[in-house]
Image (cartoon, rainbow, N blue to C red):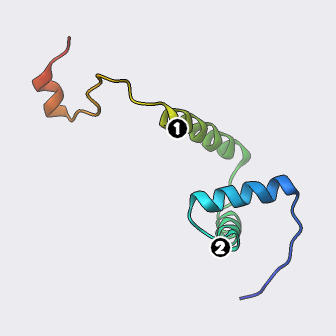
Amino acid sequence: MKSVTISLDDEVYENAIAQAAKKRKSVGDFLRDFFSSRLNHEVEPADEAKTSTLQSIWDVADSKAVTPGTVGRLNREALYDRGLP
């Protein structure tokens, strides 16, 4: 395996640290995986924008607290047994 030294803007570096922490990886491991996935799978800018938009939507949904009194997820049988209001 070869070692490479790169220079990053402070903002990019901080973002890499945050993303690595979310994935419980070192910054080096995170960047190696990031570069490997990008170099092995070329992503069209339009697809990247869609992925980014979807990720933003999921992040917002995940950040919202569950409303008290909701029943949570129901499977098909539970929904039929419960009926509609």
Quarter where residue 84 is shown: top left
Q: Which mark is residue 29?
A: 2
Q: Could you tell me which residue is drawn at 15 percent across and 31 percent down?
A: 78
Q: Is residue 66 above or below residue 30?
A: above
Figure quadrant of the C terminus: top left
Crowd class of label 1 (few under 14; some 14 to 19; many from 20; radius 10 Å): few
Disc 1 marks which residue? 58
Residue 23 image offset from top left, x and y in percent: 56, 61
Q: Is residue 65 above or below residue 15?
A: above
Residue 10 image offset from top left, x and y in percent: 86, 56
In the displayed orientation, state which residue is furthest to the front: 68
In the displayed orientation, state which residue is furthest to the left: 81
| Residue type (three-letter) at the residue carrying disc 1 | Trp
Helix, strand or loop at label 2? It is: helix
| Residue type (three-letter) at the residue carrying disc 2 | Asp
Quarter where residue 73 is shown: top left
Quarter where residue 79 is shown: top left
Q: Could you tell me which residue is drawn at 68 percent across and 54 percent down?
A: 43
